[in-house]
Image: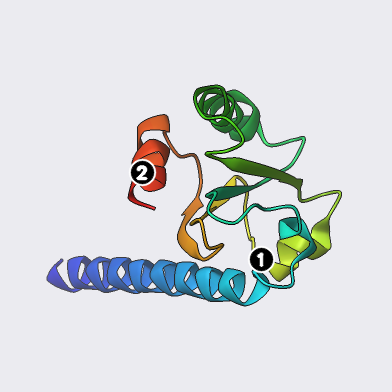
C-alpha cells in the first residue's frame, strides 16, 4: 500500500516537473521568435500583446476563452493591448514555431515583446488583468 502511494507521489512530482519544463521551453522558444516571427510584425512598442492559439473545433476556446478575451478587448483599447488570434489548423507552422501542443494556449508578451507568461488551457479574466497590470 505504501509503495503504491509512493509511486503515485513520484509520478505526480515527475508530471509537475515535466509540465514546468514544457512551459519554460515554450517561453524560451517564444523569446527566440520575438524579433523575427511574422505574427509580431504589427506590434507596437510599449503595448503588451497576447498571442492566442485556438482551433475551430476547440469547445473551451469558443465557450470560455474567446469570451474572456473579447471582454478584455472591450475594456482595453488598441493602445493598451494587442490581441493576436492564431488558428492552429490554418497556420500549423506558427504552432510549431511557438511549440504549442494544445489549445487554448496563450502567450502574454510585455511591452518590449518579451514573453512573460504562458497559459496552457483556459485562463480567467482576472488572471489576465493581473498579468497585464504587472507587465
Q: Front-most of 30 and 75?
A: 75
Q: Which mark is residue 108?
A: none
Residue 45 position by quadrant: bottom right
Q: In x, y percent, where is residue 75?
A: 49, 24
Q: State the SS at label 2.
A: helix
Q: In x, y percent, where is residue 106?
A: 56, 49
Q: Residue furthest right?
A: 90
Looking at the rendering, in which quadrant would you find the N terminus?
A: bottom left
Q: Front-most of 64 and 131?
A: 131
Front label number (1 vs 2): 2
The residue where tag 1 is placed is 98
Q: How many marks?
A: 2
**Is residue 76 rendered to the left or right of residue 42?**
left
Image height of 129 relative to 75, above or below:
below
Q: Residues within 10 Å of mark 1 (few under 14, many from 20)?
A: many
Q: Which mark is residue 133?
A: 2
Mark 1 or mark 2, earlier in chain: 1
Q: Residues within 10 Å of mark 2 (few under 14, many from 20)?
A: few
Residue appearing at x 52%, y 39% in the figure:
80
Q: Front-most of 28 and 9?
A: 28
Residue appearing at x 75%, y 35% in the figure:
57
Residue appearing at x 56%, y 22% in the figure:
74
**Is residue 113 rendered to the left or right of residue 1?**
right
Asked whether disc 1 touches disc 2, contact meaning CB atoms under 8 Å apart, the reply is: no
Q: CA distance from mark 1 to mark 2?
A: 24 Å
Amino acid at each position: 500500500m505504501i509503495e503504491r502511494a509512493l509511486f503515485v507521489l513520484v509520478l505526480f512530482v515527475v508530471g509537475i516537473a515535466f509540465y514546468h519544463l514544457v512551459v519554460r521551453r515554450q517561453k524560451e522558444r517564444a523569446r527566440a521568435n520575438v524579433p523575427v516571427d511574422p505574427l509580431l510584425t504589427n506590434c507596437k512598442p510599449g503595448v503588451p500583446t497576447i498571442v492566442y492559439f485556438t482551433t475551430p473545433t476547440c469547445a473551451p476556446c469558443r465557450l470560455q476563452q474567446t469570451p474572456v478575451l473579447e471582454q478584455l478587448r472591450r475594456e482595453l483599447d488598441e493602445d493598451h493591448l494587442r490581441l493576436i488570434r492564431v488558428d492552429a489548423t490554418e497556420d500549423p507552422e506558427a504552432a510549431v514555431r511557438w511549440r504549442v501542443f494544445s489549445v487554448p494556449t496563450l502567450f502574454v508578451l510585455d511591452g518590449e515583446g518579451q514573453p512573460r507568461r504562458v497559459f496552457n488551457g483556459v485562463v480567467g479574466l482576472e488572471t489576465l488583468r493581473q498579468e497585464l497590470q504587472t507587465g
